[in-house]
Image (cartoon, grey):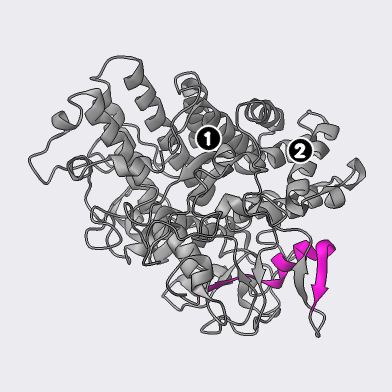
Amino acid sequence: MKNIINKFTVGFALALSIVSCHDDLDQTPIDPDSFTEEDVFANIDEAKGALAKLYASLALTGQEGPAGDADISGIDEGFSQYTRMLFNLNELTTDNAVVGWGDPGLPDLHNLSWSSGNDFSEAMYYRLGQEVSFCNSFIANATSLSGTEAQTYIAEARFLRAYAYYNLIDLYANVPLTTVVSTELPLQSDRTELFSFVETELLEIQDLLADSNEYGRVDKVAAWALLSRLYLNAETWIGEDRYADCITYSNEVINSSYSINTNDVNGNGSAYDELFLADNNTNGAQNEFIFTANFDGVQSTTYGGTTFLIHAAIGGSMDPLAYGVNGGWSGLRTTKALVNKFASSITVKDSDGYPTAWADHRAMFYTDGQEYEITTISNTFTDGYAVTKFSNVNSDGSQANDTSGEFADTDIPLIRLAEIYLNYAEAALRGGGGDLNTAVNLVNQLRTRAYGNDSGNISISDLSLSFILNERSRELYWEGLRRTDLVRFNQFTTDTYVWPFKGGSNDGNGVDSYRKIFPLPTNVISINPNLEQNSGY
């Protein structure tokens, strides 16, 4: 189905709603109306609606739609949506993106100068805390149900909770570990304890999850894929080499029923762009998507998600209608550092010698009237190439569901098979075993799709860690992974790799290493004396 989040009713949403301003990761759901938890979990069909709320929490922001009844207070409701926050924290802080808006705290992200009071890092903490709270409540109540289907639902909730904690480990390192609904102020856990929790959960639920599931819900392959990602980062996070385990679970995913999309529906020479069109739930891309945040421009409206990624990336001389929306927000662009990752595939340059066309179809940039160099970020959309990766049109060029063009249908892949191909290659290069010839083959499958032929293929002599980091940038940019990758390769804070406006300077410079993680929100620290702020903040 297009969107499991359309399955939940207002009653289910209210029964699992929580206090808007969260104080920590242990929030107790409240029931503002007479519809009780007993009603929600009266039978398996009702419980499915409650399960849908857990998925919805990663896509929507409240009970009414784009605005009006937010789950989280203290920040614009649209700003607080999960994938929008993931973009802000993992893309805006890197060479992949800048934004021209001056909202307090936003410029600090691409300058790498945020404080513990940053609105956006705080909102993400609360959003993930909300997901943990929802999952804890669901798991506690669903145990009253019997049968295999109920156990599958509980396993899905445990996956979503593990996914939230994966993000918390990555972004904040040391947070409370809470698995029950309680009013007690939780103790702080370190990355090693949290890592072990996520690992154990995923290993335990892998055989409880469905072999395959309806679109929008996770199956056992999602558990393997998240394990692959977890183990790839183990050395960075807990100082433990788990690359062999990354290879093991990457292989499980690679040998599963998922497949790289090669269905070039619109006939432009590459099947890559189909991954990011409005019908990516049906055009073949869905076969590559292991875990998604799903959107529908009529049924599930938000000013985050792909509505944000598409509108915000349009400005200058761009025609919004070409991307299926009714206007541009003139915000997001990219830096020359990302553009240069595609240098070897340049086919056309302008009169100043700057690239305007590429053989690698993943280079989805709008250059007409856009400057290659960024002189000024704020209020100057034409400084920096625009990114056209996400679009709200269908593969045949038709309009998506919302004919007004306000809200997008395009789903966001949170984990897709291409990432796991690159995980395997990197883990093999880092000594995890596997086979380098297999790694080359996997990389070349992605590059053949990108070029539409084998002209961009590599040989084993080309395969190196620096190549993999750049290939991950080419394949996965704007999908919420870049900061994590740069940290793992020790290039996020150091001056060995800089990009425009890193550290606040036009040419870029290194910053203190504590910036590899974000601070815990100031008000969380003040409320819970059990918590210690991350070093440097």
Asked whether the viewer can see residue 207, the reply is yes
The residue labelled by disc 1 is 195
The question of residue 341 being in magenta is answered with yes
Packing grade of label 2 (10 A; few <14, some 14-19, many >=20) is: some
The question of residue 338 being in magenta is answered with yes
- 62 or 320: which is nearer to us? 320
**Dot label at residue 442:** 2
For residue 442, what is the image quadrant? top right
Report the residue at 80% width, 85% height from top.
352
Report the residue at 22% width, 62% height from top.
68
Residue 224 to residue 272: above or below: above
- 79 or 236: which is nearer to us? 79
For residue 404, what is the image quadrant? bottom left
Residue 331 pos. (x, y %): 50, 75
Q: Residue furthest left?
A: 34
Residue 270 pos. (x, y %): 70, 52
The answer to whether 359 appears left or right of 338 in the picture is right
Which amino acid type is shown beneath numbered disc 2? Leu
Asked whether the viewer can see residue 131, the reply is no
Which amino acid type is shown beneath numbered disc 1? Phe
Between disc 2 and disc 1, the foreground one is 2
Packing grade of label 1 (10 A; few <14, some 14-19, many >=20) is: many
Q: Residue furthest right?
A: 461
Give the structural element (helix, strand or loop) at label 2: helix
Write down the region rendered in magenta.
331-349
For residue 497, what is the image quadrant? bottom right
In space, the residues marked 2 and 1 are separated at their CA atoms by 28 Å
